[in-house]
Image (tube, rainbow, N blue to C red):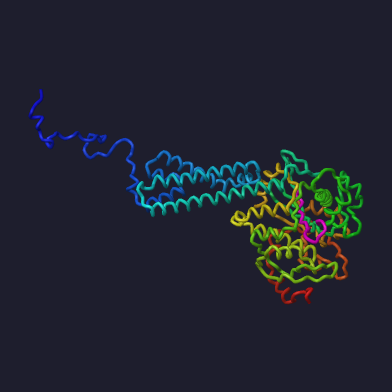
Amino acid sequence: MTDDADLTRPIGDAPALPPVPTGSTRTGAAPSGRARRERPEERPMGAVLGLTALNALLPGTAFLATGRRRIGAALLVVTLLLLGAGIWLATAGRRSAVRLAVDSDGLVWLVAGIVVLALAWIAVIVTGYRSLLPRHSSRPRHLLGGLLVAALVAAVAYPAYRIGTVAVAQRGLLDGVFAEDRESATVVDTPDPFGDQERVNVLLLGGDGGEGREGVRTDTVIVASIETATGETTLLSLPRNLEDLPFPASSPLAAIYPEGFESGNESESLLNAVYRNGPADHPDVLGPTDDPGADFLKLGVGEALGLPIDYFVLVNLDGFSRLVDALGGITVNVNYFVPINGEPTLGILPDGYIAPGPDQLMNGETALHFARGRFGLTDYDRMARQRCTIDAIIDAADPITLLEQYQDLAATTQDIVSTDIPRSALDDFVDLAFLVKDAEVRSVVFDTSLIDPAYPDYGRMRQIVQETLTGTTASTAPPPAPGTSASGEVPDGSPPAPVEGAPPAADVADACAFDPAQAQAALEAGEPPTRRG
């Protein structure tokens, strides 16, 4: 049976429904359990854009703002770890960073890592923005947010692309200059190239090859003798017109040239002609090698100085101007008129001169004239300017320029630089470079104050080298100033007599400074004659 009263009870008199559970029995208490996430509709667009930008700088912050704490915290920790690793590489870990830069296989992994990191970073930016965006946003808001996300993605992708291209160019440079299949008659590739050597001796050659020139003449010959424990470096510069270059008795060249190097007439028998004429006159005499001219010079210069030459580096001036232009030019000081072109042996006057003046910005063509000019000057003047040119190139190679122009620089370097330094020695050279950077660099120039290039006393030269490297000094007579008769030829054309004494080992820091008195005297004397009259 049913109750008639219940059947006819008004609807409005029904009992109230039980309350919705709130997770707490106390009135007004906050919800318990998982924290309540902020609804996207409640966040203004300005906050969305600000958090999106912050999330690009510190990946994970957008997820923390939307309540996804685990993924947000994980991304933030990874970001801080990567940031810490980057700071370490830029400071205490610079040596490891440079070692990576000379490791061809390591560069492949670096490129792969950059790609993965960039894609992950972009994904975090996009997904973070989507989690912050209100579900029912207007089209203008979507457009504004999309523009910001696109800009942030580009800000991540472009640097990653540039760094990747630099890494690829660096790997190409390593493969081109430090080829693993390179053969040398004077280098044996071993796992521990330096071993227990107290010094490493590197022959630095400046090749004066180029358009209109037959072969390569090494007008710049410098030996960098580096102490492996301290990085202290002594630069030993030899004149290009040095004659009768000797060779070690253990070398087959000693039997061929018992009285020193000779190749026809006197001008073809000078030091700067050995690289070209030696292999041309006696091909394959040293066995398999990719650069016989460099091996000739390593053996001869090593015997002349009493030092074993470990490696060589040749920089050919053919292409030098492209290197300078890729750097945006170089800045040098000019203390006297430097000739542009001209041929002293034929009496052909220069086309013009580079005038004296401080801090002159030179493009590649002008810098090449500055490094090559010799008319009316001496080989020693030119040698000094070439050292200044190298210093200026180092100064111009700031990190931003290198990053922007690295592909061009790497391609140019492959064209103008060759060496027999094996890849196995690159790590050791990295360690040595960090020592050299903070160590003393001295220079000894074997000019006519020390030797007569036409009749060199090689025994005396070896003695000078040993006195310099061991720190003993028998005389402190200063070297002659550039352009003076003591470092060039006397009026009748005969070389001045050499001055007996110890090596004038000098710090190279002041050699390229501007000398106002010398520059003013040159300007007052006026520009020398030119072909134009």
Q: Residue furthest left?
A: 5
Q: How many marks?
A: 0
Asked whether residue 38 is drawn in magenta, I would say no
Does residue 462 appear to the left or right of 514 in the view shown? right
Does residue 371 appear to the left or right of 25 in the view shown? right
- Residue toward you, 230 or 53: 53
- Residue toward you, 307 or 311: 311
- Residue toward you, 309 or 485: 309
Q: Quadrant of residue 206?
A: bottom right
Range drawn in magenta: 201-216
Residue drawn at (60%, 41%) of the image: 109
Is 6 above or below relative to 518? above
Is 195 above or below relative to 333? above
Residue drawn at (66%, 62%) of the image: 330
- From the top left corner, tell me how far across and down residue 281 is, in percent: 89, 51
Q: Residue furthest top?
A: 1
- From the top left corner, tell me how far across and down residue 172 is, in percent: 67, 47
If the image is split into quadrants, where does the N terminus sit?
A: top left
- From the top left corner, tell me how far across and down residue 451 is, in percent: 84, 59
- Residue toward you, 283 or 373: 283
Is 9 above or below relative to 77? above
Whether residue 306 is visible here, answered yes or no, is no
Q: Quadrant of residue 365?
A: bottom right
- From the top left corner, tell me how far across and down residue 397 is, in percent: 64, 57
Does residue 294 appear to the left or right of 133 in the view shown? right
Does residue 224 appear to the left or right of 266 in the view shown? left
Asked whether residue 211 is drawn in magenta, I would say yes
If the image is split into quadrants, where does the C terminus sit?
A: bottom right
